[in-house]
Amino acid sequence: MERPAILWVDMTITTRHSELDTLFFEYFDIRYGTVPNPAEGELQLGPGEALAFEFDYPDRPGLSLLRSTKQCYPQVPIVMITTQHSEQLAVWAYRNRVIDFLTMPVTRTDLVRCSQLLQAVQNADSRQKKRTIFDHHSRIPGEIPVGQRVRGVRLEAALHFVQTNFRRTIRIAEVAKLCDMSSFHFSHEFTEAYALTFQEYLLRYRILEACKELRHPNVPVANVAYSVGFNDPSYFARIFRRFIGLSPSEYCEQMRHGSHEERLQEVVERLELPALESIEEIGRREERQQKLMQYSHVKDASKQ
């Protein structure tokens, strides 16, 4: 039996076509298309071709576009793919007549089901009487943001990169590439988002890490400077005083007579660093998501 044909519409803001799971190509004939605009005319689809809307982090304009496309072309099967695990989002999709809702990473079970659904639709007798489709407007879930979080999602990668690589030399070009931007575009977006340049953020983050290390009174200040990415201890001392209001030695002395946790909180507030989910928090969140996915897959398998 021939594989179902799909016109793939990329609505993602953090992924590329090359990152599409190779499993999809085993079950579908895929060609990439531009974002449809139902108001501008006919959607260019081949005979029996379905639509796939791929999201990573759906927003309201994106979901509204999917819904309006389905309203303009009710006979076209639409598959929705997303990395966002949300029961409310899945309910919204099915209420808006999406034929299947897939969450990444997909399994073979997911793709076999989706393929069979599309084959059933595409092989249906075209001579059957057309049915009136009830036009149901389902409210978009409140958890979905009003606008695309392009800036926030992309720049989070830069923040996490600094968090794990601050001890070495970091060049804007490599971080911009990580965020899929040019150096100029990245610098502009970062400053617009966080009201400080990337280099300024890097300095502040290094000073924060230096404060953590200075709680140990026997560690030489020069060693701390080198440890957090400064090549010149004198320059480190100047930058430290600029942000903290004390020399590294004076700060270290204060640590002997106060609570490190309270003092560190003051430093965080003083540095005004962008809020960043910790690596540990990310790990715990991903672990919870993985367990939920495994549980969901076990339930699916038990039903078959």
Image (cartoon, helix red, strand yellow):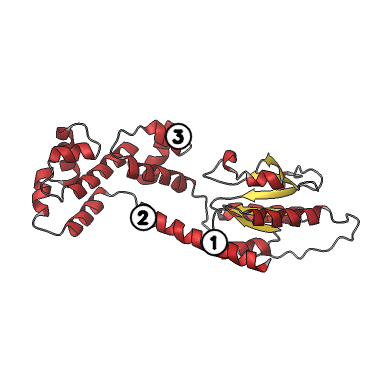
Dot 3: within a 10 Å radius of its alpha carbon, few (fewer than 14), some, or many (20 or more) residues? few
- Which dot, 1 or 2, sits closer to the camera? 1
Q: Is residue 140 visible?
A: no
Q: Residue at position x 46%, y 44% from top?
A: 154
Q: Is residue 37 left or right of residue 207?
A: right
| Label 2 secondary element | helix
Q: Residue at position x 42%, y 32% from top?
A: 183
| Label 3 secondary element | helix
* Label annotation for residue 280: 2
- Residue annotated with mark 3: 177
Q: Is residue 56 left or right of residue 300?
A: left
Marks 3 and 2 close (CB-CB < 8 Å): no
For this rendering, which residue is in front, 50 or 114?
114
Question: Where is residue 241, by image quadrant?
Answer: top left
* Label annotation for residue 294: 1
Q: Residue at position x 41%, y 58% from top?
A: 284
Which numbered disc, 1 or 3, marks the residue that appears first in the sequence?
A: 3
